[in-house]
Amino acid sequence: MWKWLHPYANPEVSYHFAGKLLPWLSALAALFLSIGIVWALAFAPADYQQGDSFRIFYIHVPAASLSMGIYFGMAVAAFTSLVWQFKLADASAAALAPVGATFTAIALITGAAWGKPMWGTWWIWDARLTSELILLFLYLGVIALHSAFEDKNLAGKAAGILTLVGVINLPIIKYSVEWWNTLHQGSTVSKLGKPSMSADMLWPFLFCFVGFILLVSVIVCIRFRSEILARNSIRPWVRTLVSKHIKEENNNAV
Amino acid sequence: MQFDSFSAFINMGGYGFYVWLSFGVATALLLILIFSSILGHKKVIKSIAQRKQREDKLRQVRKQRQQQDKQLKAKLSEEVTE
């Protein structure tokens, strides 16, 4: 049943597969993001309470939910690598970490810029904001561990253990608005059943969300390919690929 | 279109600073991430190429030295037999 997956465990096959996906993903990401952002900024209606400050929602919520989604993906990769010693999982975990850290930073900064006009403060040490800040520190720790060891297998193991310990933070972020009293509002989009949002606000949000997911996959593909090359630098296929690249570059320079 | 004029669009109903701050920071961070990822890919390729060059050079030197050794030995053995 899973036999079709086996060739993708080969780094060379995965490298070329990711390379083939890249142009399609980039085009789709550009399409969805440009539609979504223009719709969100100029055409979506203003909120009846929050006015036009509500437009921050269209990047804040996708960034925040992706910061958690990417962490979950990284945790699955780390688990796969630790249990089955699957080398490509380490490469993908290392590729995911900087992307997740960036989205966490975006969620925190846009949240502060939204909190100032709505709550009257840039920052407050409440459950949702603090746990999201801890998520950022977890990402930074994972990135630091990945680059702290010369031996990439050892680095992957150390970073993987930190990643798995940090998973406990995910449900804390998710349910913090229900477990504790907080300034942060509850979720409007992912309510079970119907989202409590009008359709002309929901559609631009969906475009932005899908666009950001596509953008994440583009960046992860690029970084995944770099990680594969760095981890397989002595393999013959990497050597021939690299000398081909250098030759092409020299030809262009001349 | 929700706004009557361009200035109203920039003003965002009084929330212009916060809205544009959010979108600006998000765009800037994502652009930095994209370009650093592309740059990182080129850097990896370059460093592997450099290492390959170094190793090729070492291999060449080793070969040359082996040849010189052989020649020297041949010469010595010739001298001895003479």
Image (spheres, grey):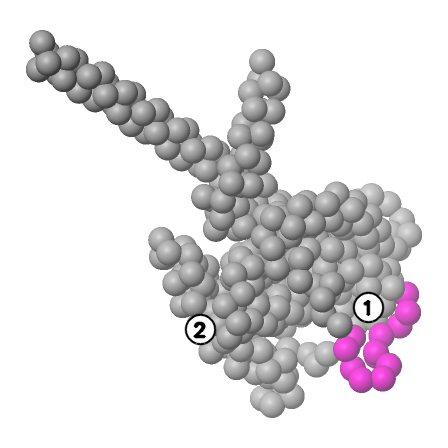
Tell me the number on the disc at residue A192: none
* Residue A79 seen from this side: yes
The extreme front residue here reads B81
| Cα–Cα gap, marks 1 and 2 | 43 Å
1 vs 2, front mark? 2
Amino acid type for the residue under numbered disc 2: Ile
Q: Residue at x 60, y 48 (%)?
A: A12
- Placement of the N terminus of chain A among the 4 image quadrants: bottom right
> Crowdedness of circle 2 by 10 Å Cα count: few (<14), some, many (20+)?
some
Q: Chain of mark 1?
A: A
Q: Main secondary structure of the magenta part?
A: loop
Please identify the quarter of the rendering in which residue A174 is found. Answer: bottom right
Task: Return the disc, 1 or 2, that comes first in the chain's sequence.
Answer: 1
* Residue A26 seen from this side: no
The foreground one among A147 and A198 is A147
Image coordinates of residue A241 in percent, x first then y, are 57, 36
Amino acid type for the residue under numbered disc 1: Asp
Q: Residue at x 82, y 64 (%)?
A: A206
Q: Residue at x 80, y 84 (%)?
A: A192
> Crowdedness of circle 1 by 10 Å Cα count: few (<14), some, many (20+)?
few
Q: Is residue A35 magenta?
A: no
Side (left or right) of B13 relative to A82: right
The residue that mark 2 highlights is: A161
The foreground one among A239 and B78 is B78
Q: Chain of mark 2?
A: A
The relative height of residue A87 versus residue B79 in the rendered view (above or below) is: below
Where does the magenta region start and end? A188-201
The relative height of residue A188 versus residue A51 in the rendered view (above or below) is: below
Image coordinates of residue A36 in percent, x first then y, are 81, 55
Q: Residue at x 26, y 25 (%)?
A: B66
The residue that mark 1 highlights is: A47
